[in-house]
Amino acid sequence: MAEVKSMFREVLPKQGQLSVEDVTTMVLCKPKLLPLKSLTLEKLEKMQQAAQDTIRQQETAEKEDQQIAH
Amino acid sequence: MSQATMGSEMEPLFRAWSYFRRRKFQLCADLCTQMLEKSPYDQAAWILKARALTEMVYIDEIDVDQEGIAEMILDENAIAQVPRPGTSLKLPGTTQTGGPSQAVRPITQAGRPITGFLRPSTQSGRPGTMEQAIKTPRTAYTARPVTSSSGRFVRLGTASMLTSPDGPFINLSRLNLTKYSQKPKLAKALFEYIFHHENDVKMALDLASLSTEHSQYKDWWWKVQIGKCYYRLGMYREAEKQFKSALKQQEMVDTFLYLAKVYIILDQPVTALNLFKQGLDKFPGEVTLLCGIARIYEEMNNSSSAAEYYKEVLKQDNTHVEAIACIGSNHFYSDQPEVALRFYRRLLQMGVYNCQLFNNLGLCCFYAQQYDMTLTSFERALSLAEDEEEAADVWYNLGHIAVGIGDTNLAHQCFRLALVHNNHHAEAYNNLAVLEMRKGHIEQARALLQTASSLAPHMYEPHFNFATVSDKIGDLQRSYVAAQKSEAAFPEHVDTQHLLKQLKQHFAML
């Protein structure tokens, strides 16, 4: 019996990640399902974008007018 | 015969009406403007133009519920400052009933599990401090909060005025409201114009009170409108009175919903639930009422009851996007990605086609072991991403796929790309730190973890990881402080408790 036992030797992998019980590992944040947007929210965002665009356009137009005047 | 010649033969008012019915509001308004130039006192054209302009910016008032910082911090409407558990939306029960734990399902800043559907009011978990209030994202993406709830409406209002070069269509300050209140049909259209298009709530309230007086308080519609104005002005108790009185006269689904909205802002979810159930007695199987109940349960962290009611919603209306999305995300986070996949595929069949859906499909496919569809879904999601934040989230999730297949280099690149798109992506910082740690770069990992924990103090992962790393290099004091923060964020986390116990033993030995 003793002879048979000596044939097997313990193998510990040295490369790669080794998982051992009772050792605290770091945790990853979990994958995130993205929430779908409601129609109202989409419309609100679209309207706000459009509003900002018009305001920006008018501001640049005003600036150009002022530059021409100077 | 071309359309143009046929159109020119048509009576202008009739053509404008046709535009209105086909929802071509800009064309309708332009045509009405031409008609009004010819005959300024044409009431039909005037009212049609007002309605067209209203429809252009109309949003369902029931869904709109944006709380600004001012409203959240200076809130004096809540009845109890320290409410009993299960009776308040502010303090959702710490023990989640039926839902997956925080270790599986990410949470929002307010401490709720993330939801499958986003409404204007979804994110309104009230922060405790000013600092938190400023940091709380108002939509899913933009980190910048609105300073007061009226801010957005005012901006929209000014923009709509800017677009018409000769000033506003109706000069509100010169209106004789008493005169208009005598003509009920005109008054209703005018009210909606003032309320939705001009966003002048005070003026709208004046008109509504004059009109309700003229109708001798017999018209429930005006009472609901007065209630809406009071709600916008923050006078919730007055709004409640108006809605209740309207309900006495005529029971309408809308009125139930408005009244429930008042109770929710007064932080009385149980009253709101009872009201919804009362409404369901009158209108059995009404989808909006069922959905309202489900939303409240979801906000109170009772996801099993919420799922039950969302299923009830689907029995009545099997194309309800919100219900499908919420049930889908519930299944995903309770370890049934293959069931979630069926729900999201259903949404795809129904014609929802956006970045979020493909991202979710990709994740479900991967975890349900349908690898052939995973990467194509994510490619689609990336090509459909509308802004930087969306792209960042997709890259972040792709990073998980890379971690899953063991390709750490790809994972590293994905999380980096997530950070390129959105510099405030705390989860990506945390995961990057874990990867750095695997490579043995301790200092880099610590720096990344510190960034992550300052960006998102509500997440337990960065605190816990920082505690682990500090513990490894022997910085026990910092490790203890971080572990305590982690425990505060997630009290049931076993590894944190374990670490704390170990550290306490260390300190006792000194």
Image (cartoon, helix red, strand yellow):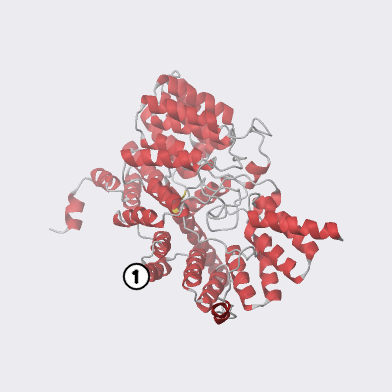
Q: Residue at x 60, y 53 (%)?
A: B145
Q: Secondary structure at mark 1?
A: helix
Q: Quadrant of residue B257?
A: top left
**Residue B480, position as x, y percentages in the image:** 76, 59
**Residue A31, position as x, y percentages in the image:** 50, 61
Query: Which residue extends farthest front?
Result: A1
Left/right of residue A66 with respect to residue A49 in the rendered view: right
Q: Please, which chain is the residue tagged with disc 1 on?
A: B
Query: Which residue extends farthest left?
Result: B1
Determine if residue B313 is in view. Answer: yes
Number of numbered callouts drawn: 1
Q: Amino acid at mark 1?
A: Asp
Left/right of residue B375 with respect to residue B484 in the rendered view: left
**Residue B477, position as x, y percentages in the image:** 80, 62
Image quadrant occupied by the N terminus of chain B: bottom left
Q: Is residue B418 above or below residue B326?
A: below
Image quadrant occupied by the C terminus of chain B: bottom right
Q: Quadrant of residue B462?
A: bottom right
Q: Quadrant of residue B486?
A: bottom right
Q: Nearer the viewer, residue B54 or B42?
A: B54
Q: Is residue B349 above or below residue B430?
A: above
Q: Is residue B196 above or below residue B116?
A: above
Q: Nearer the viewer, residue B66 or B473?
A: B473
Determine if residue B424 is in view. Answer: no
Q: Nearer the viewer, residue B73 or B146?
A: B73
| Residue neighbourhood size for the residue with mark 1, other residues' Cα within 10 Å, grouped as few (<14), some (14–19), many (≥20) | few
**Residue B364, position as x, y percentages in the image:** 41, 60
Query: Which residue extends farthest right?
Result: B510
Q: Residue at x 31, y 44 (%)?
A: B318
Give the residue pinned by disc 1. Answer: B372
Left/right of residue B242 with respect to residue B74 in the rendered view: left
